[in-house]
Image (cartoon, grey):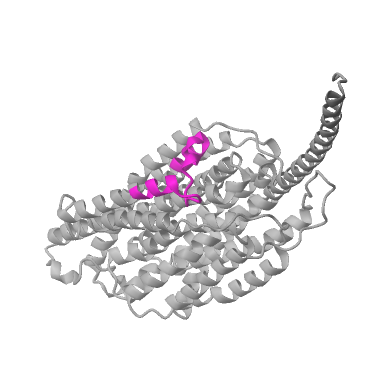
Amino acid sequence: MSSHTTAPAAAAPGHSPAMTHRQVLEALSGIILGMFVALLAATITSTSMPRIVSDLGGSQHAYTWVVTATLLTQTVSTPLWGKFADLVNRKALVQIALVITVLSAAAAGFSHNIGTLIACRAVQGIGAGGLMALATVLVSDIVSPRERGRYMGLMGGVMAVSQVGGPLLGGVLTDAVGWRWNFFVGIPFAVVAILVLQKTLHLPQLPRRTAKIDYWGAALISVGVSLLLLWVTFAGNDFEWVSWQTFAMVGGAVVALVAAVLVERVVSEPIIPLHLFRNSTFVLAVIGSIAVGVGMFGTAVFLSQYLQLSRGKTPTESGLLTIPMVVGTMLAGIVLGRIISKTGRYKAIMIGGGVVFAAALFGMSTIDAHTSFVLISIYLFGLGLGVGALMQNLVLAVQNTLDIREMGAGTSTVAFFRSLGGAIGVSALGAVLANQVKDDIATGLAKAGVPASAMGDSGAVPDLSKVPGPIRTIIENAYADGISQIFLVAVPMAIIALVCVIFLKEIPLGTRSGVEQLLEQQSAGDRSQAAMAAGADTVGEELAAASVGDDGARAGDATGTPRA
């Protein structure tokens, strides 16, 4: 497979060419636009999801799986994308990921039942996994760790815009023309992103290793993770926690994951290189990323249900009410990123972010159906600030310790575990919410003397516009109590992330980009080969001279003349 396009002007021998600020911005424009497409596809339905699932006749479990399906496929595909990034053309890969993301999103717009929607969202997760993993790897290619905070601020700003604009745009489209347009609106953005990437992303010709993909490892990891998520989702509702289904699912997951570890130990190009786990920074970042994933995805996904089903807000209003969280994330990305680039220090910022993250989750665990929106906005701002201070900087800390030849695999592995934490968080917290809401509604109906049959399918996501007043109040209180409960469950995960950051060893940020490191390694290899060739020539001359001397000595021996 052909490699990247020609680089900027070559440097003098022994030196690596550094990209100018303008060249970096041009290259980043395509990368950031690709990230924007992925995030827009992921966030645009967040405020519309209660209405979408209700229109398609889905249950609370179906609501959870519309999100979980995307996170699951994103999780299991991320290491594959990262491994491909170490082996083949990264520019082509990110364009392929864009095509997958948008075509699957458009297909989801034609869904007429909840099963089709879940399937389309699962395919969408494959593309999203590629876009998020490859964007981070490409940034490491063109920007040094020390300068990365400066440019990551731009990426954080775009992420914030997509996180605000996605829910808002989705809410407006749902209220104005219907929720199906949530899935169609991203197509023109994707086309533009592909064209911009083609024009602006120019990386130098770099040597690539022979592509050897660990398909067995990928399959076993996928099976193991999928079984765990299925078990977490359905246990306690469709079957008992202690049952043959639990033993089958958990046992199968353990067998698959143990087999995956054994495979990863022997294959030449493992999906997740196990030797990375000897790196303490990598291990702590992985554990911290899992915890952040649970706290971030596992709570934010259900926020729109609180706003719409407990507080009676429209999809558009729900989008507006999440702005404080997005502003917090944006400020963390831009302001804290610049501080890191200027000082080269990141640990203190991450510790502060961990404290704020835990405090904000605890604050959200105290809300009910009547909590002031001003207070909720403060909690959401803290939640965004904490996530912004932790999420990208955990990746930065790991990238700063990785060999450039394993940047793709290492970066994508951290993203894999973050997505895994998010998928497990959504599944587990979704199951907690479903059971809590079901029990609270049943209790509320019993106290009001209303038969349970008045609710119809008690597991379905309700349409409050069709529910009588007294029952509506019961539902609103049930969702408020259930969602505050899942925020409380997420607090220990934030504490785990904080502990990991505290024990993280701060290593001075490097000053060379990935491309510069690769070109320096290539230049050093060329010089080494030249030196070896020159040495071989010298040795050859010495051997020839020695041969002549030996011949002369042997001739002297033959005539009776002694050797010198």
Depth check: 87 or 373 in front? 87
Up the image or down, 309 lies above or below 140; here it is below
Quadrant occupied by the C terminus: top right
Magenta highlight on residue 453: no
Does 483 sit left or right of 360 as displayed? Answer: left
Position of 207 compared to 560: left or right?
A: left
Bounds of the magenta span? 259-288
Residue 109 visible? The answer is yes
User: What percent of the width, then of the height, locates residue 410?
Assistant: 53, 47
Residue in view at x 75 percent, y 41 percent: 528
- The picture quadrant where one finds residue 389 is top right
Q: Residue 270: give x, y in percent of width and height.
A: 48, 50
Q: Position of residue 108 (x, y in %)?
A: 43, 75
**Vertical placement of residue 1 versus 57, above or below:** above
Q: Main secondary structure of the magenta part?
A: helix
Residue at left 50%, top 67%? 41
275 magenta-colored = yes
